[in-house]
Image: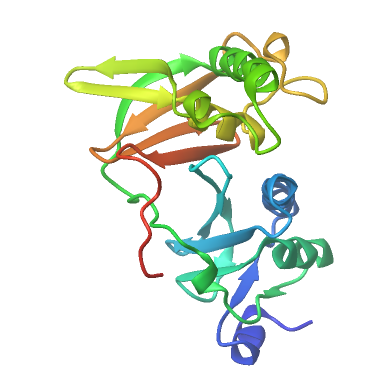
Amino acid sequence: MAGVSDLGVMSGQRVLEVSDPAERENLATFLTRAVRLDPAAVVRLRRRGERLVSGWVATGFEALAVRTVVAELGVDDVTVGADLVLAGLATGGPIDLGYSMDSAWRGALPPVDGFVHVDDVPARTLVELAEQGAQLAKDHGSSHGPPASLLDQTVLTVSAADTHVEVPMRVVFALTAMDFIPHSGDKAESRRIMPSEIVRVRATKTWLRIDARYGSVARRTGGPIPLTPS
């Protein structure tokens, strides 16, 4: 079987290798959820050090989702179809990512550093908010989805020292849509969330990030993700 270096020569180093079966499953679960939200989803893969790779996807709620796994990536940063990576993960070997789709990624990523820890919040609280929001969306939404007024509504306020963070429903929906909070059963219902399970709220001057056990969501606090060249 060709190694990473061999495949790198074949496709301009656009190669991903996730050797650990558990990490392959983690990434596959993450991408399966992204494709469920958008069948044409792309994933932006970014190398972090020698042994970590972060996968970023858009959630459809003007918030990004990310999962980091132990893996090797032949380039620093590349955007490809999520379905292509999913198919490659099923083979068990190195994944030739083929041609990049960098032009399909339309927003900036949050910084790697600079986030401050604001507070920890019970995960059950966020799932309860998502349940209430889903009911309101059902009652007042349309064929185009939940109304923007609901999505933009601040549903949680977190403060620490001189940092004040407002969490909109968009971010809560993104977190639960990606199923980042562990639960029993097939569905993330609030009653199935352990009371001890927490999510961590972090922020910079321009970004909000919520870290859960299975991944994180991030949103630019000044509004939608800005469009920048890839």
Q: Which residue occupies the foreground of this view, 132 or 123?
A: 132
User: What residue is rendered at 62% in x and 61% in y?
Assistant: 42
In this picture, residue 142 sits left or right of residue 210:
right
Give the image location of residue 117, x and y in percent.
32, 28
Q: Count of labels shown?
A: 0
Give the image location of residue 54, x and y in percent.
52, 55
Q: Quadrant of the C terminus?
A: bottom left
User: Does 15 sit above or below residue 206?
Assistant: below
Q: Residue furthest left?
A: 162
Give the image location of residue 223, x and y in percent.
35, 40
User: What residue is rendered at 67% in x and 46% in y?
Assistant: 30
User: Does 108 sit above or below residue 202?
Assistant: below
Q: Which residue occupies the foreground of this view, 185 or 43?
A: 43
User: What residue is rendered at 67% in x and 48% in y?
Assistant: 34
Picture quadrant of residue 215: top right
User: Does 114 sit above or below residue 227?
Assistant: above
Q: Quadrant of the N terminus?
A: bottom right
Q: Which residue occupies the foreground of this view, 137 or 26?
A: 137
The chosen color scheme is: rainbow
Give the image location of residue 73, x and y in percent.
55, 70
Picture quadrant of residue 207: top left
In this picture, residue 91 sits left or right of residue 136:
right
Picture quadrant of residue 87: bottom right
